[in-house]
Image (tube, rainbow, N blue to C red):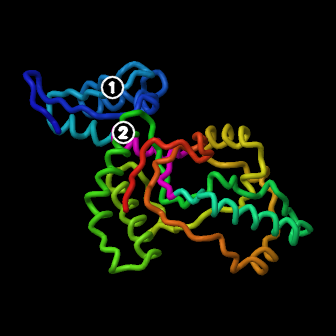
Amino acid sequence: MVEETERGFQCTVEVPSLLYKYIIGKKGETRKRLETETRTSISIPKPGMEGQIVITGQQRSGVISARTRIDVLVESFRKKQPFTHFLSFALNQPAIQEKFLQFKEEVLEKCSKDHGVNSSLFQNPAKLHLTIGTLVLLSEQETRKACELLQRSKEDFIEPIPTVEVDGSDKLQLIADRLMEQFVTSGLMMKEWDRVKLHATIMNTLFRKDTNVEQQNNATTGKSSFKERETFDGRNILKIFENFYFGELQLNSVHLSQRFSTDSSGYYATSGQLTFS
C-alpha cells in the first residue's frame, strides 16, 4: 500500500534485519543508488533492530519502483540463505523406532562388508520424519506468520477433505500438496516440485560427520562439501530389504520444525504445530 502524505507518498516494507545489509550495500552504495534512481528516500532501521523500511518520495511511481526493487533484492538474497525450518510429519513413534533399529541391525549384519556401509549412515530414530517442504524464516515475525498460516490451513482445506473419498496415502499426499501450495503462495516457501515427494530418509552420507560439524557447515554454506561425503554401495540393501516392513502409524499432526534442534523427546524442536483428526 502506498499512502499519500502531506509531503508526497510513503510505503513501508517488512524485511528481516538479517537482510538489511543487502539493501544498504557496501558503504551504503546500494541504498544511495536506489534513492537516486527512484528519487526517493529510504529509511532502514539500525542493524539488529527489527522494524519497517520506510520509502518516501514526491512521486507515487518512484515509491512503487523503489518498493519493487527492494522486494527483488530481498527475494534474491533470501534464496541464498540456508533453510531454518521445515514442515514435517513425525514418524518417531516407539513401534516405528523399534522396527527401524531392527532394520539397522540387520543391514549391518548382512551388508557391512559392502563399500562404505557402517552405523554412521543411519538416521537418529528419534528424528524419523516425512518432510513436506523447507522454509527460510529470518525473524520472529516470519515464524509467527508461518504458525498462523499453518493454523489457517486446518480450516481452509484439511478439515474439508472427506476421509471417505480417498485412502490414507492419497489423503496424506493431498494434505502435503495443499500445505506446500499455501506456503509457496505466501512467499514463505520455495516451490521445488509440482508435488511433494513424501519420503523418510533412513540412511544418508550426511549423517557420517559429527553433528556439530555438520551444523556449522550447513549453517555457513547451506550445504555440505562433496569431499566430506564418502559414498556407499546400497545395491545389496535395496535387494535384500526392498520389502522391509517398518510398521503402521496414524499421522494426525504437522510440525513446523526447527532445523538443527532437539526437544525433550529427541525430535526436532517445534515452533508451531497443527493437529487434525
SS state under label 2: helix
Looking at the rendered structure, the number of numbered marks drawn on it comes to 2
> What percent of the width, then of the height, locates residue 19?
44, 33
Front-most of residues 28 and 101: 101
> The magenta stretch spans which residues?
70-89
Left or right: residue 252 compared with residue 71: right
* Position above or below: 107 against 119: below
Q: Is residue 122 above or below residue 213?
A: below
Marks 2 and 1, the one that precedes in the sequence: 1
Q: Residue furthest front?
A: 95
For mark 1, what is the residue?
A: 51
Task: Give how far across and how far down residue 267 sits, in percent.
Answer: 59, 47
Label pair 2/1, CB-CB below 8 angstroms: no
Q: Residue furthest right?
A: 113
Please state, as top left, top right, bottom left or bottom right, where the C terminus lies in the image. Answer: bottom left
Instruction: Tell me the tag on residue 267.
Output: none
> Can residue 136 be found in the magenta stretch?
no
Q: Residue furthest top?
A: 46
Q: Residue at x 37, y 59 (%)?
A: 276
Which kind of residue does numbered mark 2 sit on? Answer: Arg
Few, some or many residues within 10 Å of mark 1 (<14, 14–19, 20+): some
Dot 2: few (<14), some (14–19), or many (≥20) neighbours within 10 Å?
A: some
The residue under label 2 is 144
Q: Secondary structure at mark 1?
A: loop
Residue beneath the point at 72% across and 49% down: 225
Res 81 seen here = no
Q: Closer to the camera, 84 or 198?
A: 198
